[in-house]
Amino acid sequence: MKCNPYYRFFSILANPLRIDIVNALKEKDSSVNELVKKLDVEQSKLSHALSSLRACNIVESSSEGKMRIYSLNKDTILPILELIDKHANCHCKGGCCE
């Protein structure tokens, strides 16, 4: 079976922790320790979720000394999130997005 990029992309995001990570990184680039504190989640679970997000290039990382800083892919993911927000504001009335 041929890999369907839509299935792969949306299945990566169809996880509450991964969505929480995306939302947190939308606000501010962060280290694992910052994300662990902000999301109140075990580091191993967070690292596993970040690994999945990195595999699909939704999340990127850079090094600052010994620390890795995670951010959203600014070329593709941030524009997609802005488009989703625009769609939700225009078309998701009446409780479908609550």
Image (tube, rainbow, N blue to C red):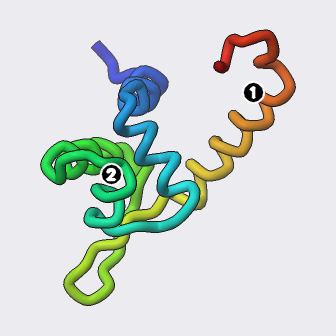
Q: Residue at x 36, y 71 (%)?
A: 69
Answer left or right for 91 relative to 39. Answer: right
Answer left or right for 65 relative to 92. Answer: left
Quadrant holding the C terminus:
top right
Question: Mark on residue 54?
Answer: 2
Q: Are marks 2 and 1 in contact (CB under 8 Å)?
A: no
**Quarter location, residue 81:** top right
Q: Residue at x 28, y 63 (%)?
A: 32
Image height of 53 relative to 91, above or below: below
- In this view, the residue in front, 40 or 56, is 40
* Amino acid bearing label 1: Ala
Q: Which is closer to the viewer, label 2 or label 1?
A: 1
Residue 7 x/y as whole percent: 42, 21
Q: Residue at x 78, y 28 (%)?
A: 87
Answer left or right for 10 relative to 50. Answer: right
Residue 21 x/y as whole percent: 41, 47
Residue 70 x/y as whole percent: 38, 64
Q: How far separated are the C-alphas under marks 2 and 1?
A: 26 Å
Say which label, 2 or 1, has the lower sequence index.
2
Structural crowding at the residue carrying mark 1, measured as other residues with C-alpha within 10 Å and reported as few (<14), some (14–19) or many (≥20): few
Question: Mark on residue 39?
Answer: none
- In this view, the residue in front, 17 or 82, is 17
Answer left or right for 75 relative to 46. Answer: right
Q: Residue at x 33, y 68 (%)?
A: 31
